[in-house]
Amino acid sequence: MKQILMGNEAIALGLIHAGVDMISGYPGTPSSEILGNFQKFRDKNKLNAYAQWATNEKVGFEVAYAGAISGKRTCATMKQVGLNVASDALMSASYIGLKGAMLLVSCDDPGFYSSQTEQDSRSFAKFAKIPVLDPATPQEAYDMVKLGSELSHHFESVVMLRPVMRVSHAREICEVDDALHVTSNEGNFERNIPRWGAVPPAGRFRQGLEQIERLEAIKLWNWEQLIEPKTHQLKGAKVLCLTSGTGDGYVKEAVEERGIQADILKLDMPYPLPKEKLEALFTSYDKVIVFEESYPCIEEQLSSPKLYGKLTKHVHLIDEFSKDKVLLAFANAGVIEPSHAYQSEKYEKELPKRPPNMCPGCPHRDVHYAITKVFKKKKSIYTSDIGCYTLGLNQAAIDTILCMGASISMASGFSISDPDKTVVATIGDSTFMHSGVAPLINAAYQNHKFILVILDNSTTAMTGRQTTPERTNPNQIDIKRIIEGCGIACHEYVYEQDLNKTVGFMKSLQEAYKTATSPVVAVVREFCVLDKDNAIGRLGNVMVEVDENKCVACDSCITNYKCPPMHYNDAGKMEIDPFLCAGCGSCLDVVCPTDAFVKKEEK
Amino acid sequence: MKYQIVIAGIGGQGAVFLVKVLSIASALAGQKCLGTENHGMSQRGGSVSCYVKIGDFYAPAIDEGQADLLIALEGNEALRNIQYLSIDKGVIVVNAPKSFPTVDFETHSIDAFKKAKAKAFPIDALNVYMLGVTLALDSRFPFTCKEIEEAITAMNAKVAEKNIAVLHLGINDAKAKK
């Protein structure tokens, strides 16, 4: 039957229809909606399946992997940088293999829409020596989930599905199964110490040999099942385009719309490739151009003087695909004359930039503001982490962003390398649970002196408010007791929408720091303004306006506080957009040097 | 039939809702549809641009110079995305004050913020209001009012009545302006 599905919904439904009944992972754009939608489809179909977030991607992978070696069909979901965290487990799992099936969904983000890196998970699959499927649309993602799960079972290998953002967040009318045709497997771990407990050197060496054999068998399967049937549709043009994932759509449209004479061969499984068989196809072509996103994964597996791609610098090396880039590659390879068919004039005047910002009323803004107010910039280093609070960059309240959990470990490092400055680290509760605990233990272990402020809004806000450990099990998991478990006193502040109090709390930390010999750790009990259950009763209802006689247009508010409703009006005075104002009233004190923000009416 | 729409706005204005409505409308009209949305970081009050491609397409994104229609929920976001419009046939439907600059495209602007401030409709329904304006003013828009109404109902039956009322408010305001 036909259903309108977003890519991540299509993947979730594909998992259900593939009989997957164990799924674990960690949220990260663009992968976050897979697990939640799986829960939704599971409940709708009254299935009994495990679908829960893990504390991080490595944990999620390992949970799903144990399921797979017990004979179940499982899945782990994450974004591409999450795969870095899970990679330790993946590299070994690739040697050991599995009994049931395991699909690893790693979503990529070409164009850096919501990610620190543009890394290509297909290249990671190549590195880990596991097969990878690269869908171009939600329909293909649905189909490839089912195919991947079968393949995983057949070859006893983890199989990766690599959708990019333009697949995960695309929406398409998809043809899906009417009903469930697969029953899920009972888990039954069968002891096999030489396999599941293989140790180096002999055990892993033997598995390494099996891994090589397995890859050869998958290469052949790739040729016979996926590639060879498509070769019959090649029309005998002089140029062959090898495509993968979304690259295929851009090439198809450009070739069709511009009337370019070229054959297109889409490689559904870009690794492992049957090198010799593919290269044998090249004999009847003058040129072979590889269109793939974002690393030269296919290109690196092939060798031919006819090959044009990223390695030969004929295809773009960074950023998302577009038809314009396809034409540029054709032109670079001498297939067409340079073309501007997909270029058009931008608006000639400069437009005000509108970068992402924290929501109006967000407690993070106040905390960042208070930190920079109390710990002066010249004498401080502000390390921060991955989450909504990263947007404290807009307030110039953050100096470093690296990866999950690095705020704390880097604070340790700076406390040694630049000891005259006060290092203030900020990290959210979900990120703290993900990768912050080990760095905190390290800091306590080595008595590193810095200030750590844990911003606890009890949700994974940036990715769509997924649950966090302490939110789900508040009586068992508590950040305060984790800190105290390290022998460190926990400074706790229940956030209020009164900036004086937040600044006052930071001053108390400054006092504590003066005599400290190890990290000073605080937890600020916040809420997410979009999280109705938690925000209720804590959001203000004050409407603020600007006393134009007092406003001197000094930029202080929009530089240091940067709340979205604040903007200059035609008279050059600050104005509050009533549609955007959350009514928190935090800006009434402290923020304006001339006290121009005044209370309007109660909402 | 091939018809490409860029929906531009600010995170939180409901651009994604319009992608969903238009994809449902495509299904109702028996058309193929491929769209793409912004989630995560780009949702946080930043610039948002979503694409809807109706007909035989394979790639979800829209290239420069290709779009038939740009629905902009805010003036600067319209200008920021103007390069996506087709030089020959591109149409802009934009929520902007009278001061919206003259550009080389057929432009239909309406000050929806002013209407919302005057409490003509709740600000949350700005997206649906602008869809109404589009229905009234874009002569090549590939959907009927009935298809859009059905799509809105399919999205969320509970609030459909209110949304459809705002849709018609948009249609009527646009016609009155014409």
Image (tube, coloured by chain):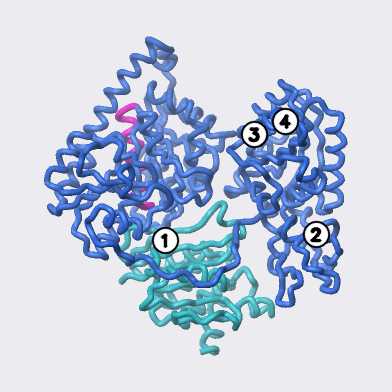
Chain colours: A blue, B cyan
The chain containing the residue under callout 3 comes to A
Residues tagged by mark 1 and mark 3 found on one chain of the structure? no
Location of the C terminus of chain A (image quadrant): bottom right
Amino acid at circle 1: Gly
Residue placed under numbered mark 2 in the picture? A587
Q: Is the residue marked by circle 3 packed among few (<14), some (14-19), or many (20+) residues within 10 Å?
A: many
- The kind of secondary structure element at disc 2 is helix
- Asked if residue A330 is positioned above or below residue A218 in the image, the reply reads below
Name the spot of residue A394 as percent of width and height, x first.
Answer: 66, 54
What range of the chain is rendered magenta? A137-156
Amino acid at circle 3: Met
Residue depth check, mark 2 versus mark 3: number of the one nearer the observer: 2
Where residue A493 is drawn, which disc sits there? none
- The kind of secondary structure element at disc 3 is helix
Q: Is the residue marked by circle 4 packed among few (<14), some (14-19), or many (20+) residues within 10 Å?
A: many
Answer left or right for A124 relative to A475: left
Residue at the image position 68 percent from the left and 50 percent from the top: A392
Residue placed under numbered mark 1 in the picture? B35
Disc 1/disc 3 C-alpha distance (Å): 35 Å
Residues tagged by mark 4 and mark 1 found on one chain of the structure? no
Residue depth check, mark 2 versus mark 4: number of the one nearer the observer: 4
Where residue A433 is drawn, which disc sits there? 3
- The kind of secondary structure element at disc 4 is helix
Disc 4/disc 3 C-alpha distance (Å): 23 Å
Residue placed under numbered mark 4 in the picture? A415
Of residue A475 and residue A126, the one placed in the foreground of this image is: A126
Question: Image quadrant of residue B30?
Answer: bottom left
Disc 4/disc 1 C-alpha distance (Å): 49 Å
Residues tagged by mark 2 and mark 4 found on one chain of the structure? yes
Residue at the image position 82 percent from the left and 61 percent from the top: A592
